[in-house]
Image: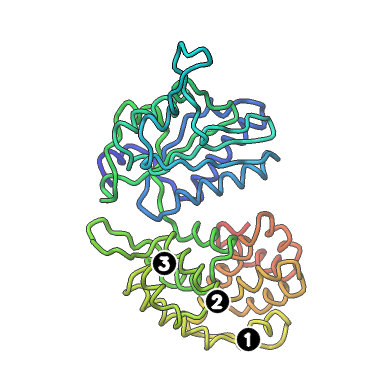
Amino acid sequence: MSKEQATIPSLSIEKMIDELTNIYTKVINNGLSPKIVPSVMLWGPPGVGKSQAVKQIARELEISTGKRCKVTDVRLLLFNPIDLRGIPTANEDKTLAVWLKPQIFQMDPSDRIINILFLDEISAAPMSVQAAAYQITLDRVVGEHKLPDNCIVIAAGNRVTDKSVAFKMPKALANRLCHIDVLGSHESWERWAVKNGINERVIGFVAFRPNYLMGFDPSNDDLAFATPRSWEMVSNILNLNGGNVKSSYSLIAGCIGAGAAVEFSSFCKLYDKLPNIESIFEGRYTPMPKDVDVLHALISSMTAYAREHKNDITKIANSISFAMDMPSDFAAVLFKNYCSIEKGYKNLLMRIPEFYKWISTKGAHFNGII
């Protein structure tokens, strides 16, 4: 951590989303303007999930406020100060210059909408553009143009120590922002991955080898390395080709690097050793694997199947009965994944006798399930 980052709080992606969603929800549901909350600056290494987090905040706000949330993504690296203020032109009687508002700031001011102005990669913008952002972050104005009262401002960028394109933030701009250092966390990433349909092989491998979730090293010159963002790329590739790792190996290595791709490919061969997942959910007798790596793969496959059949309570109950024979720590991981399938799903699980029995006897040892 750099000297600059040492004085600001560090939060996991999940914790950051929860805290910001909570404060924005209280403001909006009380009929107040989001501008009373300071603009937020999210710091973190490339690929940790800052941009995805802002989209998740928007989704959570739609649920908690009943309003539609629109995210305007502005990459300040691509702007100059004039772009932010707008193009000058003559007024109607050609006596004064007026500035045409840029389209990106043309937001719906109605009470049915929440706007999020996301100033991404702000630390990569030249100093002159960062200086032009002073008004946006503090006063919610851009030259003569005013952001609507329903607008939240969130900025994000890489740290200078990440050796990405980044300039040191001017103190005057820094003092206008509430700073958060965003950390990668396997537990919070896994919950997000289950909820968002990340490929089961990716979830299983990262659960088995959590050190591979974030392979970014600023001292290393590798172009391809593992991050939450690049694992999502791998997931998209696998989801498109039916999970065939062999046929997509080069693309996978191009996303996460050769070293991680070799380990991932080897792990995926375990899926050939798994018991029939459908048999488990149909309630037919199925032997329980013993090997640790196979159990990780089994949990990810069961989670993916449960997500697809989340409304079939009989099948979910059958899988929970099967999981009773798992080692308790593996069963806990599976049930945490089930709780992450969608918001409030754990309430449905608690109505399944097998799940309630497990929670009553063993659940106290595993924080976060209920």
The reply to whether discs 1 and 3 touch (Cβ–Cβ < 8 Å) is no
Compare residues 292 and 113 and report the one nearer the observer: 113
Instruction: Say which quarter of the image contains residue 68.
Output: top right
Compare residues 134 and 361 and report the one nearer the observer: 134
Q: Would you name the residue on which mark 3 appears?
A: 210
Q: Would you name the residue on which mark 2 appears?
A: 327
Q: Would you name the residue on which mark 1 appears?
A: 276
Tell me where residue 316 appears, x and y as whole percent: 71, 72
Q: How is the image coloured?
A: rainbow
Lower sequence index among marks 2 and 1: 1
- In what element is the residue under mark 3? helix
Compare residues 309 and 110 and report the one nearer the observer: 110
The amino acid sitting under disc 1 is Asn
Label 2 neighbour load within 10 Å: few <14, some 14-19, many 20+:
few
Q: CA distance from mark 2 to mark 1?
A: 19 Å
Q: CA distance from mark 3 to mark 2?
A: 19 Å
